Amino acid sequence: MTYSISQFKMTLHNLGYSLGPDGLNGNHGNLLDLYTQSAIQEFQAHFGLLMTGKVDQPTSECARQLIRNLQHRLNLTTNAQLPINEFYGPRMIRAVMRFQQLHDMPMTGIAGSTVRQKLNEEVKQLLRQRVCAVEGILVGNG
């Protein structure tokens, strides 16, 4: 299953990709215009996909996995309790804003590349702390 054009526009917008001078407000609906095609191609290039400018199966699946990963990372770092699915809805926007607030970032609700990078760093640090704690317990009991 692939996203509709309007769903994918919302996803692109929430991931920080430009949909033209008016952003999502001026570019809604199921029209695959030049701004949308350009944003799709930018997304595809960023993730090493064939740059078709269309919401094809590989592009949809990449976006789905990216959203799921973001939801999981937000759950780990902010205890957002988001469902793990392919939708970037209002709860996810609030969770991203909470993460941005905690890290003194502009509170946009958009998980652009800077937010995603910081989120990845936070998850790595959190996991390292958990591994060290477990290893400390194992060494202490050994």
Image (tube, rainbow, N blue to C red):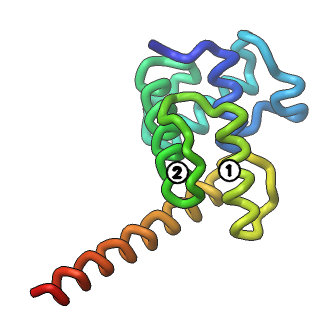
Name the one closer to the observer, 74 or 19. 74
Looking at the picture, how far across and down is residue 10, in whole percent?
A: 70, 27
Quarter assignment of residue 16 = top right
Disc 2 to disc 1: CB gap under 8 Å:
no
Tell me the number on the disc at residue 96. 1
Residue at 53% across / 46% down in the picture?
70
| Residue identifier under label 2 | 75
3D distance between C-alphas at marks 2 and 1: 10 Å
Could you tell whether 12 is left or right of 46 in the image? right
Could you tell whether 38 is left or right of 48 in the image? right
Residue at 74% across / 21% down in the picture?
34
- Going by the numbered disc 1, the residue's amino acid type is Val
Circle 1: element type: helix
Looking at the picture, how far across and down is residue 52, in whole percent?
A: 52, 23
Looking at the picture, how far across and down is residue 30, in whole percent?
A: 72, 10
Residue at 61% across / 13% down in the picture?
4
Is residue 117 something that shows in the picture? yes
Disc 1: CA contacts within 10 A as few (<14), some (14-19) or many (>=20): many
Circle 2: element type: helix
In the rendered image, which quarter contains the N terminus? Answer: top left
Mark 2 or mark 1: whose residue is earlier in sequence:
2
Name the one closer to the observer, 123 or 27. 123
Is residue 39 something that shows in the picture? no
Could you tell whether 96 is left or right of 120 in the image? right
Looking at the picture, how far across and down is residue 21, in whole percent?
A: 88, 35
